[in-house]
Image (spheres, rainbow, N blue to C red):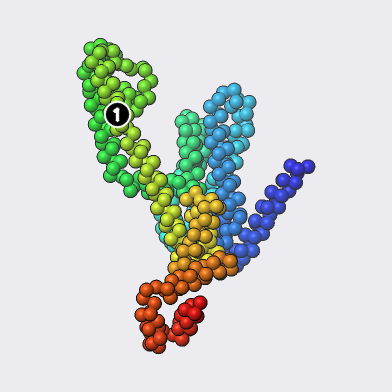
């Protein structure tokens, strides 16, 4: 009974999302409605999230099937089912690709109906979408004339579609670009160390085991495995001097090979902190400008998801920003509780009392009593505080 109720609630949720979407997009063109379904916008509503979830689930199911197809005792009895799943997921991916290509002209960057779409087709995310469906159609057309089993590998590229639904890649990309020069320097050091290690390995081990260390390029495989601390054991030094040099270089390699990992971890954390500070500043600016619109709220929500901020984080940032603005006198948000406003008011009154008790209180009072330096209200407040 509970399962039936859950299904009814799920269907009802989808129905309500569709109704809300139709109502929010009333009067809009068909292309605008398609754009709102596949891209976050003020009128997307919950239907956009449902479509995203369907695509993500299709990607995961498709990739799992590609992996399981390589197991013969699973693939043989379920070959037809795998084919049906492949067809269904390709239809979903194809509809998504066509819908995004059709509606991309709603963005200013791709406004032109022809050149805009051509430009959009060569963006990275759209090329990934094309790669997700390309192997299926190629296999469908040429399956009778060519052996296209190697195209199965490219179906795993569908996992890259998930990068559209996470901002982690964007943060990682910015971190890599910011530390590019340092990473290039570290990579250069690693290459030098690999060449040096391979050369020494060849020099000391070639005579002892010519089959393994037959050339410096062959020894590079052993050098990389040794320096990265993997150590498969298929190629090992046999001579005493070879083992001694290997031990020394391995200790050096631990530090050199660890540099890029440390740099990336530090850069990613730092970039995430910078992005969150930018998010907080944007939120502060929007509050100062006035009441947040629906579009502003949705944009902030999308940015918060990209930065991996949960509801507690957002609430903490909201409270901190509003308190800072009230204390600085820049803005008083309408949704601040009266109790919080009263507390800030009492703090301001306490600060004013300090001026009355200051050593230069008489000088301040003399200036206040001159009408050109103060208003009547300011003088009344001063007298009221002084009489307390």
Looking at the picture, tell me which residue is in the foreground, 116 or 386: 386
**Residue 224 visible from this viewpoint:** no
Q: Is residue 207 above or below residue 182?
A: above
Q: Position of residue 210 (x, y in %)?
A: 26, 13
Q: Position of residue 48 (x, y in %)?
A: 58, 54
Looking at the picture, tell me which residue is in the foreground, 279 or 72: 279
Residue drawn at (48%, 30%), measured in percent from left and top?
149
Q: Position of residue 201 (x, y in %)?
A: 25, 20
Label 1: which residue?
Answer: 253
Looking at the picture, tell me which residue is in the foreground, 223 or 84: 223
Residue drawn at (24%, 31%), measured in percent from left and top?
192
**Residue 88's image quarter?**
top right
Q: Position of residue 276 (x, y in %)?
A: 44, 54
**Residue 246's image quarter?**
top left
Residue drawn at (46%, 49%), measured in percent from left and top?
167
Q: Is residue 353 left or right of residue 9?
A: left
Q: Is residue 82 left or right of residue 308?
A: right
Q: Is residue 211 left or right of residue 159?
A: left
* Residue that sits furthest to the right in the current view: 1
């Amino acid at each position: 009974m509970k399962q039936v109720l859950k299904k009814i609630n799920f269907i009802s949720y989808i129905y309500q999302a569709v109704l809300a979407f139709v109502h929010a997009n009333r009067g809009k063109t068909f292309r605008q409605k398609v754009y709102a379904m596949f891209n976050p916008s003020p009128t997307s509503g919950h239907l956009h999230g449902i479509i995203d979830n369907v695509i993500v689930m299709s990607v995961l199911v498709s990739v799992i099937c590609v992996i399981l197809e390589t197991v013969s005792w699973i693939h043989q009895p379920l070959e037809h089912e795998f084919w049906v799943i492949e067809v269904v997921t390709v239809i979903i991916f194809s509809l998504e690709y066509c819908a995004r290509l059709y509606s991309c002209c709603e963005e200013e960057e791709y406004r032109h109906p022809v050149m805009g779409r051509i430009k959009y087709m060569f963006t990275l995310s759209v090329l990934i979408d094309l790669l997700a469906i390309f192997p299926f159609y190629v296999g469908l057309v040429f399956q009778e004339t060519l052996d296209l089993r190697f195209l199965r590998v490219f179906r795993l590229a569908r996992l890259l579609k998930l990068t559209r639904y996470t901002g982690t890649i964007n943060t990682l990309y910015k971190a890599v670009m910011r530390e590019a020069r340092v990473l290039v320097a570290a990579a250069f050091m690693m290459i030098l160390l690999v060449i040096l290690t391979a050369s020494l390995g060849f020099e000391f081990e070639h005579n002892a085991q010519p089959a393994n260390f037959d050339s410096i390029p062959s020894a590079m495989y052993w050098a990389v495995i040794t320096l990265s601390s993997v150590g498969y054991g298929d190629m090992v030094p046999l001579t005493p001097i070879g083992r001694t040099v290997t031990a020394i270089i391995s200790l050096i390699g631990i530090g050199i090979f660890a540099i890029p990992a440390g740099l990336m971890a530090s850069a990613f954390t730092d970039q995430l902190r910078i992005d969150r500070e930018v998010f907080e500043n944007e939120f502060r600016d929007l509050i100062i400008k006035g009441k947040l619109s629906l579009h502003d709220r949705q944009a902030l929500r999308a940015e918060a998801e990209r930065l991996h901020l949960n509801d507690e984080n957002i609430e903490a940032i909201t409270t901190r920003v509003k308190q800072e603005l009230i204390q600085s006198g820049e803005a008083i948000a309408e949704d601040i509780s009266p109790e919080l406003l009263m507390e800030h008011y009492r703090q301001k009154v306490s600060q004013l009392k300090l001026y009355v008790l200051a050593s230069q209180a008489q000088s301040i009072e003399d200036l206040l009593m001159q009408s050109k330096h103060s208003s009547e209200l300011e003088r009344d407040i001063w007298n009221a505080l002084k009489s307390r």
